[in-house]
Image: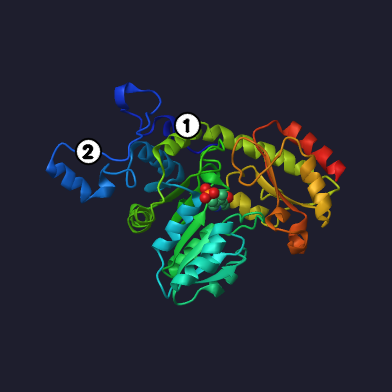
Amino acid sequence: MPRDNYGAILHHLGEETLPLNAVSPPIFQTSNFCFPSFEELRAAVNDELGHCLYTRGNNPTVNLAEVKLAALEKGEKAKLLGSGAAAITNSVMAFVKAGDHIVCVRDAYTWMGKLASSYLPRFGVECSFVEGTDIAEIEAAIRVNTRLIYLESPTSMTFKLQDLSAVASLARSRGIRTITDNTWATPYFCNPLELGVDVVVHSGSKYLGGCSDIIAGVVVGNKEDVERIIQQESLQMGSVADPFMAWLMLRGLRTFHLRMPAHFRSAMDVSRFLESHGKVAQVLYPFLDSHPQAELAKRQFRGGSGLLSIRLDTADIRRVARFVDSLTLFKRAVSWGGYESLVFPSAASYASANEVPKDRAGLVRLHIGLEESEALIADLDQALSKM
Ligand SMILES: *Cc1c(COP(=O)(O)O)cnc(C)c1O
């Protein structure tokens, strides 16, 4: 059951007075804004976050999306950025300096992994990686100079959960900030700020946009943290959202609350079918009773999105490829969170078959889109039979 009046947020909030009483918010496709006087210009230049001065800082179309995103995620303030990678990078960089240490989940999104393992060390920030499923392991990784714990529940491809409330309260007791990537659950199914996490990051390219037509990132938190991320990192790195992207985000958001329960229903149908299939060794979906953290999933999330992984009952890449190539409704592609079903075999991340680690050979990620679940099941069934 939805906890929010989604219509009020997605269709009305921030749209009370639109120019010329337009129904659909106009796009402010402008790089800069002008002022009637020296004094007003000076006021804007000296308080960029409080004014529309230049679109790298504020823009009304971008700001409208931000008001809705903050309300969805139950945060004081949201910032829409040029990509999820920018949201991650800007948020992490805002809270560390040379000599600091961070703790990060091992199977985090690829570009967070690279940030922690090779980018931050160039600037004297060290990282410890943890599995994340056991709070004692996270506690043991904390050092005197730990400033940040970076979470992603569940992790990309492998669907390992962290207990967000438990990690957040541990971190608070040690004066450490927490950031979590909530792209998978979306604010429809989880609000990490309510669980005590300090900053939430999203790839808006996935369910928030929902139409596979934008690259976007979102940061949500309290006003002070988000303004620090903007002032210190986003304005500096120029990782901004453009007005047209923000407008497409607003357009996609109008159906967000209708899309998410549909993805959940179909993902449950498909994962139950896959679990019963002889050629599938394991289905990794947090809402299946067979998931090792199913109980935590039910406590942490109000439901699940459309992304899951399977382990095929083979380590032979040619057989995996035959399955993937036989699918007709699942497009072979990276990314997820749009209306369409997608397949991504983990082995495709490696340039040649002999580089693929054993436990990744049969691992295949599926995005369950908004097609009828019976049709998706029939497609998976015929492709498995050709394997
Ligand atoms: C896609 C993704 C990102 C990165 O977002 P971009 O918009 O592609 O930069 C971050 N986290 C997760 C979990 C993702 O799936």
Closer to the observer: label 2 or label 1?
2
Q: Position of residue 359 (x, y in %)?
A: 75, 61
Residue 5 visible to the viewer:
no
x then y, percent, for residue 374: 75, 32
Amino acid type of the residue tagged 1 in the rendering:
Arg
Identify the residue position indicated by label 2 in the image. 34
Helix, strand or loop for disc 2: loop
Q: Nearer the viewer, residue 228 or 90?
A: 90
In whole angstroms, how far apart are the C-alphas of marks 2 and 1? 28 Å
Q: Which mark is residue 251?
A: 1
Q: Which amino acid, by three-letter code, is at mark 2? A: Cys
Residue 314: give its label: none
Q: Is residue 104 left or right of residue 319?
A: left
Coordinates of residue 235 in the picture (x, y in percent): 34, 53
Residue 199 in percent (x, y) is at 44, 55
Quadrant in the rendering for residue 139: bottom right
Work out whether 245 lies above or below 334: above
Q: Residue at left 51%, top 73%? A: 142
